[in-house]
Image (cartoon, rainbow, N blue to C red):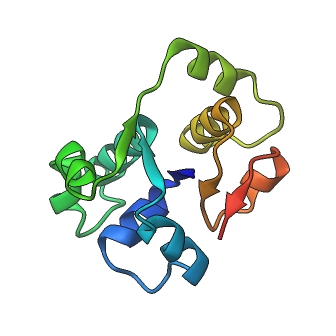
Amino acid sequence: MRVLLDTHALLWWMADSRRLSTTAHQSIANEANDVLVSAASAWEISTKFRIGKLPGGETIATDIAGRVTHQGFTALVIDLADAERAGRLPGPHRDPFDRMLMAQALARGLPVVSVDEVFDRYGVNRIW
């Protein structure tokens, strides 16, 4: 199975945080799964670190690609169709990072590992 990580799930995984649910942890740890990390998460992590909203995030923020590769995860690029789809998603949810993850998940039929219930309202299959 292929799964897409929400940014907080990626950060919590890398920090070995207990905030990950058992189901989320098992989905990421399952070697049979292809774990995807969107370029949107790299953008979000870098942005939040730059503006001071990711304390202690220097290790990951300075080498996101290397950390993702080291974990054996697969990078998911953003293409023009993803950007257009994200921009056209209905509703008031304004978080551009979530909207991109939703667009990518919907286009590729991917479940998203996320605690955030907003994905449910957009018809995205969510693992938590």
Report the front residue among 68 and 121: 68
Residue at 67% across / 29% down in the picture?
107
Q: Is residue 48 above or below residue 24?
A: above
Left or right of 12, for residue 125: right
Q: How many marks?
A: 0
The quadrant of the image that shows the C terminus is bottom right
Q: Residue 75: horizontal and vertical position, in percent?
A: 36, 38
Residue farthest along the bottom direction in this orientation: 18
Q: Is residue 90 above or below residue 36?
A: above
Report the front residue among 75 and 30: 30
Residue farthest along the front direction in this orientation: 32
Residue at 82% across / 31% down in the picture?
90
Left or right of 36, for residue 112: right
Residue at 61% across / 53% down in the picture?
112
Report the front residue among 69 and 52: 69
Q: Residue 119: horizontal and vertical position, in percent?
A: 73, 52
Q: Residue 39: horizontal and vertical position, in percent?
A: 40, 36
Q: Residue 56 lies in what quarter of the image? A: bottom left
Residue at 64% across / 16% down in the picture?
84
Q: Residue 29: horizontal and vertical position, in percent?
A: 42, 70
